[in-house]
Each structure stands twice: as structure tokens, then as C-alpha cells.
Amino acid sequence: MGRFGFIIHPLSGRADVARKYAFARFLPERWIEYVLKFVPSSVVSHITGVTGAAGAQAEGWFVGCPLTPRQFVVLPEQYVLGRIIQAARLAEQVGARIVGLGAYTSVVGDAGVTIANNVGIAVTTGNSYTVATAVEGALQAAALMGIVPAQARAAVVGATGSIGRVCSLLLAEAAADLVLVGRDEDKLRALQEQIGRDSVTLATDPAAALPHADIVITVTSAVDTVIEPGHLKPGAVVCDVARPRDVSRAVAQRRPDVLVIEGGVVAVPGQVEFGFDFGFPPRTAYACMAETMLLALEQRYESFSLGRELEIAKVREMRALAQKHGFALAGFRSFERAVSDEQIARTREAAAARRAAATKAG
């Protein structure tokens, strides 16, 4: 049986800590963060029932690293890395042979390399399968919205990051035009040259770039939202891979003509019991978790997705392993809710109405 660990952390001090301690919802965020600095890593739950299509089995453990996204950003890097290493070593102690890095634990420092060098088991960020599911989900959702990628403009927000770079390379193969959005113009130009297409443009401001994009994948490491209601084109599809989210909840409230989906939501085969409520329906998980499970099912205890330079070959290999073991996209979700066919139809109708109104006004 394969054995894995996966490191999780609260995405919001108040909301996530309140899942376990109800009184936390009444405390200021900074108070909660102060207390979390003194809380050691701990085993949160035992994961059972992961069973691949060919019968391979795996068990695992969620290990909590109790820091918030803001703390991962503002606290000294060496302190934060030490906390993540502590959590990874705890996963090793309970029997894991590979550990996955969730959310901000995968982006601190050198994206897992230092952590892998300081523990006795394999480490993966899960980013290879995250990329595979993000691009697959965005293109599937686009088709349901009547968008033909070969005739559409796509955009990647956070294009120069580890996940964003490979999403950009893959989307460039599917879309007519591509906009790379990021803060570092030199890195954007380097990625543009790597893609090597005339139809790839650059932008540093999402507000200026996104109103012309039909398909958006957003995967920044921002603590606050970066995409607001006024940024998006009627009928656009937005795949939000970032945790915490890049897309403001105001988009769901004020833009019924835009389809926002969560990136990387995967159905896990078997009678899986996670033993912990992270806000998903039963037997579904983030793609980064699923990559760790897939490597455990294969008993491939190797540091698969590490560092800032993901390989397209590994993305495709992870997609093949997912097909082998019966992992698949778990439909679409938007702001913690399943997206129905009826909702997609309503979104298409709202987009058509908004475009018609704009044409009439013009």
C-alpha cells in the first residue's frame, strides 16, 4: 500500500480556524495569527480508501502547518520554511513516503527544493497535475460557453509563476491569441520568447488586459483578490487556480454573464474518507492532493514537481497516470458550489443579453 502525507494550512485565520474552534470567528484576524505562531504542526486526519482503477491502494495523512497566507508572506522566509519542514518531518514520522505541499507551502522560497533537501522522504508541490486539470477544465468550460479556443483570446494571470508558465505554454497551443499577465516585464518577455508566437502579447495590469479575453486562467500568489467585476468580458470563462482566490466574490454577485470555475477539483477513486472537512464534496480533492495520491498509488517515491521550472512532459505524464487510476475532473465548482448545466445556460443567456445591450448602446 502506498503512503503519503499532505500539508495543509488555514486559508483564512478566522474562517478556517473556526471550523475546529467556533469561538475564533469572533476574534480579530491578527489575534488569531499571533496565536498560530506558537501552535506546532500536527496530524489533522488519517486518509483511507484511495483505490485506483487497477486495484492499487494508498493511505495518507493531512498534516497542519498553522500559518495563514499573510504570515507565509510577511514572516521571515527561513522561519516559514522551518515550519513547513517541521510539518513534513511529522508526515514522515507517521509513515508517509512522499509528502505534498498545499497552497502557500508550495510557493515559499524555492518551491519545495529546500524542503526536499531537509526531509527523508520525497516531496511534490502537485503542480504538474494542477496544470493539467486547470487547462483541461478551462477548455471544457469554454466549449460549454460556446467559445472556440482556436478563434479566441486567452489570458494567464500570474503567467511567470511555476504553474502559470506551463499553463501559458499549453494554452498557446490551443488559443488564437494569448495575453501573458504579470508584474515582472523582463520575465514576461522571456516567456513570450520561449512561446515564440507573434500572437502573444504582454500586460502588467489585469484591469487593462482581461476585458478582451475569452478564457482566463489565474494563478497568482496574491494574498488579496486581483480580478474584480469590471475586469471581465461578457461570456468569459475564468479558471481560478489560486488559493486564496484571485477572483473577487463580487464577480459572482455582479457578473451573471461570466463563468468562474475553481481550478483543479478532482474526483478521487475509491471509498475515500479524508477525515477532515476542507469544503469539498465527499471523495473530491484539489489536484495537488491528487498528484500526491497518484505517486503513492504508483509507489513512486520521488520528488516529482519541484522548483520554479515545471516540465510539460511531467504534466502530460501525470495526466496519463490520472487516467490509469481513474482520477478525473469532478465537474465544475464556483465559490464552493457545484455549477449545473442550467447555471451555464443562464450564464450564456446573460452574456448574450449584455452583448446585445452594449451593441444597442453603441
Image (cartoon, rainbow, N blue to C red):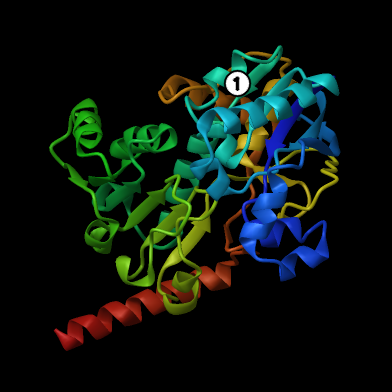
Q: Quadrant of the C terminus?
A: bottom left
Q: Farthest residue in the bottom direction?
A: 361
Tell me residue 73's x, y (percent).
50, 43
Residue found 65% across the figure and 52% down from its top? 33
Is the residue 224 above or below the residue 342 in the image? above
The residue carrying pointer 1 sits among few (fewer than 14), some (14 to 19) or many (20 or more) residues within 10 Å by Cα, namely many
Please name the residue that numbered disc 1 is placed on: 115
Place residue 338 in its image quadrant: bottom right
Is the residue 124 above or below the residue 346 in the image? above
Residue found 31% across the figure and 66% down from its top? 231
In-front residue for pair 349/197? 197
Residue found 40% across the figure and 74% down from its top? 257
Is the residue 347 above or below the residue 98 in the image? below
Name the residue type under label 1.
Ile
Tell me residue 9's x, y (percent).
67, 44
Which type of secondary structure does the marked residue at label 1 adopt?
A: helix
In-front residue for pair 98/13? 13
Q: Quadrant of the N terminus?
A: top right
Is the residue 264 above or below the residue 93 in the image? below
How many numbered circles does the render carry? 1
Q: Is residue 69 visible?
A: yes
Tell me residue 70's x, y (percent).
54, 49
Residue found 32% across the figure and 40% down from its top? 174
Q: Is residue 294 visible?
A: no
Tell me residue 10's x, y (percent).
67, 50
In-front residue for pair 84/310? 84
Task: Please give left or right for residue 1 compared with residue 342 in the image.
Answer: right
